Each structure stands twice: as structure tokens, then as C-alpha cells.
Image (cartoon, rainbow, N blue to C red):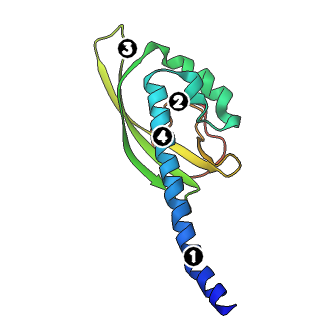
Amino acid sequence: MLRLILSLFVLLPAFGGCQSANRAAQLDESVRGYTLALRRSDQQVAAQFVEPRARNDFLSSFRELDRYHFSDIQVGFVSPTEDMEQAIVSLDIEYFSPTGMQLYQVQRFFNWTYDRDSKRWLLSERHPLGQSQAGPLSPGPRDSR
């Protein structure tokens, strides 16, 4: 019995590390999927990465992007919390308007939350371009730029 208890103490941290690695891989996959949908201006696919309570506002805001074309989107950094429940992701975005001759470059920040029910990462943002400044990590409604 003592051996069983001791083996649990050895295995539980290993399981936690495995779970963290799995969530990190899922976050990476979600961020890549979202950036691809954003680059392709595919609002239906992009909306699948958004928390349900923010999805309608997100889709309304996405229509504003019709006047722009994204030439490049790169992940700047991914910064998850220690418990792998939330993360801030920065994206370096280049875009232009077909009616203008100027290329714009911006860095935007996105709050992601791990949804335990669906076992996947979801955006907490109500705007497809996230926020212009990194804010504190917190789940829940965001401003609707």
C-alpha cells in the first residue's frame, strides 16, 4: 500500500507536466488556426475560436475588416499562465487597403482561455484584431472596440 501511495506522488507531477504540454500544443494549434482564418478573412472559421458569449460581437466587428487585406501575420509571443488556464498571445500583423498604397504594421494582443468543458482554447476577444495593449489576464467580457 505504501508503495502505491509513493508511486502516486511520483506519477502525479508527471501527469501534470504532460497535461501542460498537451495544453501548450493545443494553444499553439488554436493560435495557428486563428491566424490562418484571419489571413484568409474567413470569419466563420475565425469565429469558431471565440468564446460563445463574445461570438456575435466578434462577427459584427469582423465585417469591418472587409476593406483590408492581410499580407503577413506572425506570432510574436505566447505567454500562458502557470496553470495553463489563460494566455496572452501577441500577433505582428501587416495589412493594406486595396484602395491605398500604404502597408501598415501593428502588434495586437489576444486573451485566450482554456475551456475545460470543450477541452480547447478559446479567444476572449470581441474584436478580431484583439487589443492594442496587453492587459491583465482575466476571463470574461472585453470591451467591444
Disc assigned to residue 11: 1
Report the residue at 57% width, 76% height from top: 11
Up/down of 78 relative to 143, above or below: below
First in sequence: mark 2 vs mark 3: 3
Disc assigned to residue 128: 2
Tell me if mark 4 has few (under 14), some (14-19) or many (20+) residues whose alpha carbon lies within 10 angstroms of its own.
many
Viewer-side label of 2, 1: 1
Badge 2 marks a residue whose secondary structure is loop
Please state which amino acid type lies under the numbered disc 1: Leu
Residue wearing tag 4: 31
Measured Cα–Cα span from mark 4 to mark 2: 13 Å
Viewer-side label of 4, 1: 1
Q: Are marks 4 and 1 in contact (CB under 8 Å)?
A: no
Describe residue 117's horizontal placement relative to residue 41 as left or right.
right
Tell me if mark 2 has few (under 14), some (14-19) or many (20+) residues whose alpha carbon lies within 10 angstroms of its own.
many
Q: Are marks 2 and 3 in contact (CB under 8 Å)?
A: no
First in sequence: mark 4 vs mark 1: 1
